[in-house]
Image: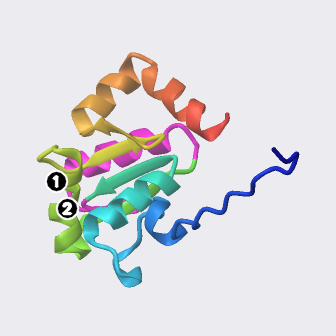
Amino acid sequence: MSDQKKSISLPLANPEKNVEAQPRTREEGGDVLSEIAREVAENPVLLYMKGLPQQPMCGFSARAAAILASYGRPFHAVDILVDPDKRQGIKEYSSWPTIPQVYIGGEFVGGSDILMQLHENGELGKLIASVTGE
């Protein structure tokens, strides 16, 4: 027997097929659920609402935006009224039938009522601080 080591050559896998790609926006060829997944992943505190914090279009969205704003930490808001596909898609993504919807640290927290409960019992501040580093 020889002291030479055998060299094994294995074909490289196609990294584009085997590596889970970051979700793509619809402009990048993704679908609405992929776009939502990307928004959730990229924004530590995310609010899907009717209107925008400066001009909410329903009372529940206004309340959710005001609660989040009260912590003085940045949050990202998405107006689902301008995009009917996203309005339906966010309901499918979360399996939650109503708007607004809040995500913190990539996790679905709930709607306006749940946000209010977490705010009142002090848990919301802790959640926000945990993802904003404050």
Q: Is residue 83 above or below residue 111?
A: below
The residue where tag 1 is placed is 92
Pinpoint residue 110: horizontal percent, then vertical percent.
27, 37
Mark 2 and mark 1: Cα distance apart in space: 5 Å
Check if residue 101 falls in the magenta segment. no
Q: Which mark is residue 111?
A: none
Q: Is residue 47 above or below residue 124?
A: below
Report the residue at 38% width, 83% height from top: 27
Report the residue at 16% width, 43% height from top: 96
- Furthest toward the top, the residue is 121
Q: Quadrant of the N terminus?
A: top right
Magenta part of the chain = 50-73
Report the residue at 51% width, 56% height from top: 42
The residue where tag 2 is placed is 89
Closer to the camera, 35 or 14?
14
Q: Is residue 16 above or below residue 99?
A: below
